[in-house]
Image: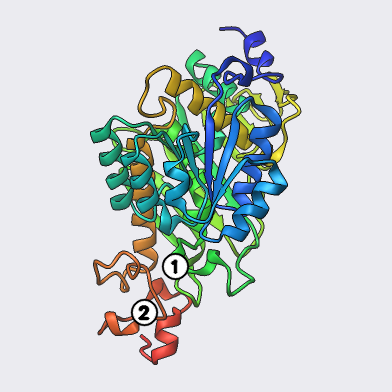
Amino acid sequence: MTVTEVEDLQYVGVFRPAAEPSLGWGVIGTGWIAERFVAGTLSYTPQRIVAVGSRSAERSAAFAARRGVEHSYGSYSALIGDPAVDAVYIGVTADQHLPLALEVIAAGKPVLVEKPFALTAAEASDIRAAARAAGVFAMEAMWTRYLPQSDAIRMLLRQGALGEVEVVAADHGQVLADDPTSRLVNPALGGGALLDLGVYPLAFTSELLGTPASIIATGDVLASGVDGTVAMLLTYAGSTAHATLSTSIRVHTPTVAAISGTAARIEIDSPFYMPTRFVLIGPSYGTEPMLRWQDQSGIAAHEGLSYQATALARFVSEGRTESPIHGLDESVAILSTIDAARAQLTADLVRTNDRTRQFGRPDRPDQAPGLLCIHLMFTRCGWCTATGRLD
């Protein structure tokens, strides 16, 4: 491997659309992320979108008409059963990921599940177990892993260009909590900063350092019961390395990332999880970058979602049952970290095994008698406000 090889990835990544077999995709969901997945995939790959499914036949038909999709369905099961569908992308809210993924797996079809993979690590474990038992391909749609910049960074790490990685820093914050009706502030739908945005810096760090041995999390909880802003310090067994991460749905943050090693560091420009640019800099202050890398593929922003469709087509053609770059064990481990961080923020609310109540459901206080709202001295939740049960 040479610097030239890394530089060449500015123009085309490891996952080259024309080189992979074309699959017939069924898309579950007609919302914002499904629109962008379909738009990017149709524009930049030979993958075919053959069907779209929604709980509303009208929405499904309208989506199909906009995107030139041949088949539209008013039920998810009908889409999954369509013999023209080779693989399924699940692009609905996280509370539906587990049952839909299990149904796709039972049908024997490869499945790409939008991030977060599930609401909790336990749910993700159920998907993993079903996929492995059936020998069916399953993958989380952690699309950043398949972008050319990620290919280039992996090359540099394999080369040892950074030395030993000691510090990782990343953040992701957007203003998304203003609408009280949004799924992003609804705990039952998988709302909150950690599940929607924090999964990006956590996945970025996971690839570099693995699963943390200790997690310290602090932040605030919104009135609805979801986490608004979270800061985390992660440390690792048998290592001096650590990660400092933050995420927010209340404020817009720089959304950059850095990997600091004993020999050099990489600084990734904003937004670090989309097609972007980075520099490789020596260990001393004031030195010029040793490498300036910028994505020049012409695939921008969420068009980059198309890379994961190309990757899945390759992996399936190779006879794999999960991604070698972002496997199911890692998807489960990342959600375990999110579970732990959320539990620290809402430690005195976690008193029930009902998965939709774990982190606060202000509409069902009757199922959680005797709870107190401490929230590490942050904002009281909607349940406590509604019932007058304050700390």
Q: Nearer the viewer, residue 172 or 301?
A: 301
Q: Is residue 212 left or right of residue 381?
A: left
Secondary-structure class at tag 1: helix
Spot occupied by residue 138 in the image (x, y as percentages of width and height) = 39, 35
Vertically, is 269 above or below 147? Answer: below
In the image: residue 131, left or right of residue 311: left
The answer to whether residue 312 of the structure is visible from this angle is yes
- Looking at the image, which residue is at 42% across and 67% down? 188
Secondary structure type for disc 2:
loop
Q: What amino acid is labelled 1 in the image?
A: Pro
Closer to us: mark 2 or mark 1?
A: 1
* Residue at image mark 1: 187
Image quarter where the C terminus lies is bottom left
How far across and down, in percent of the image, does residue 113 sit? Answer: 45, 43
* Location of residue 224 with respect to 296 vertically, above or below: below
Please give the label number shown on residue 249. none
Residue hosting label 2 = 373
Look at the numbered discs 2 and 1 and tell me whether their residues touch, using CB distance below 8 Å.
Answer: no
